[in-house]
Image (cartoon, grey):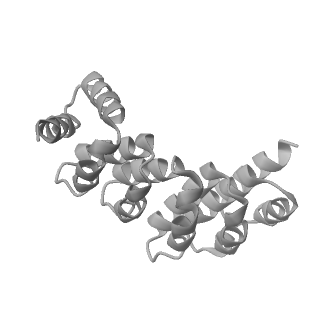
Amino acid sequence: MEVEKNIARLIENLKDNDELVQVQTTEMLVEIGEPAVDQLIDALEDGDKNIRQGAAKVLGLIGAKKAINPLITTMKDDNKWVRRASSGALSNMGESAVDPLIQTLEDEDWRVRGGAAWALGNIKSPKALDPLIKVMDDNSGFVRAGAVMALGNIGGEKAEEALEKARKDKSGYVRRVAQDFLNKD
């Protein structure tokens, strides 16, 4: 009971404006680990964006697999920093997050699809190759750029072919990201 109260107090500290307090709080919650996961998952729905963002970050650092679906839901948050923290946290989950992220590439919200593509790019799973190539035709430049970055990180002949195609994308940013990866060889 006392541990749960301490975890709740620490989670409340995530909204502190002092960055040092946030960093120390994050470190303490990561050190607590698994016993903090349920409360951190609940905190993903807190009214304070800093608590949601901090909770997402900590869950990723802990690597709590049971947080994957709640983090995917949090990628729909109104706040871009919370969405980014969720995407980053999912990147830390490795192979366990690949299938849910691949499904998320079909979400109706371009920000969510883009976050999924970027997370998949950090995980670098070859399993995501074909779904990422498919989203190269997405209407959103953000999603296409995430897919290009992901394909560049995964690598291989199939990815390289998709990157070559992306050099003709209508978005200058997408073309530049593709070119940067192609120039690495």
Residue at the image point whose x is 30% and y is 60% from the top: 78
Residue 120 drawn above or below residue 35: below
Residue 172 can be seen in this image: no
Left or right for 180, reference 121: right
Residue 162 position in % (x across, y down): 79, 65
Residue 148 can be seen in this image: yes
Location of the C terminus (image quadrant):
top right
Residue furthest to the front in view is 1
Using the rendered view, name the quadrant where residue 67 is placed: bottom left
Residue 155 drawn above or below residue 58: below
Residue at the image point whose x is 36% and y is 65% from the top: 73
Front residue of 120/178: it is 120
Front residue of 176/137: it is 137
Front residue of 127/19: it is 127
Left or right for 72, reference 17: right
Residue 25 drawn above or below residue 11: above
Residue 143 drawn above or below residue 12: below
Residue furthest to the top in view is 20
Front residue of 101/165: it is 101
Using the rendered view, name the quadrant where residue 174 is placed: bottom right
Residue 63 position in % (x across, y down): 45, 46
Residue at the image point whose x is 19% and y is 53% from the top: 46
Residue at the image point whose x is 31% and y is 42% from the top: 54
Left or right for 134, reference 183: left
Residue 151 position in % (x across, y down): 72, 58
Residue 110 position in % (x across, y down): 48, 69
